[in-house]
């Protein structure tokens, strides 16, 4: 009997060749990080696919000429620590996060 036990037999070249399972309890979710510069919140970085990683924020900054900073991850908080050009760095990160 179709759908009574969460499966459906059929739609194949031969009857009963597909055994499709339906799981209605799972949900889609994406990892996301809150991005900070010197403890000031800048924005959210969502990881929408497996190829993305939070270190891409630091790679972006390196590509823009920023070199004097460190970064750390604590749970879902990604913090960039810098003593120079913090305001400019925040602007660049905000632009990066809004364009992703």
Image (cartoon, rainbow, N blue to C red):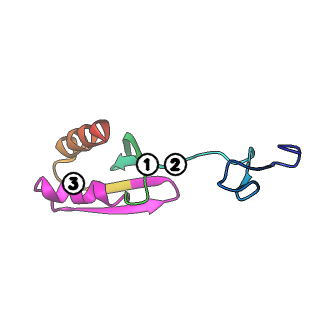
Q: Which residue is mark 1?
A: 48
First in residue order: circle 1 vs circle 2? 2
First in residue order: circle 3 vs circle 1? 1
**Image position, residue 18 (x, y; %):** 70, 56
* Quadrant where the image shows the C terminus: top left
Q: Nearer the viewer, mark 3 or mark 1?
A: 1
**Image position, residue 82 (x, y; %):** 25, 56
**Image position, residue 68 (x, y; %):** 17, 62
Q: Is residue 100 left or right of residue 44?
A: left
> What's drawn in magenta, residue-wise?
54-78
What is the secondary structure assignment of the residue under circle 2?
loop
Q: Residue at x 22, y 38 (%)?
A: 91
Q: Is residue 65 magenta?
A: yes
The answer to whether residue 94 is visible is yes
Looking at the picture, tell me which residue is in the foreground, 54 or 18: 18
Q: Which mark is residue 30?
A: 2
């Amino acid at each position: 009997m179709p759908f009574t036990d969460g499966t459906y037999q059929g739609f194949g070249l031969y009857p009963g060749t597909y055994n499709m399972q339906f799981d209605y309890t799972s949900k889609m979710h994406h990892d996301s990080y809150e991005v900070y510069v010197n403890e000031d919140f800048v924005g959210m970085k969502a990881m929408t696919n497996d190829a993305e990683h939070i270190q891409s924020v630091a790679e972006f900054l390196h590509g823009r000429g920023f070199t004097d900073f460190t970064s750390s991850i604590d749970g879902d908080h990604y913090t960039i620590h810098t003593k120079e050009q913090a305001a400019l760095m925040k602007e660049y990160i905000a632009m990066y996060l809004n364009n992703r």
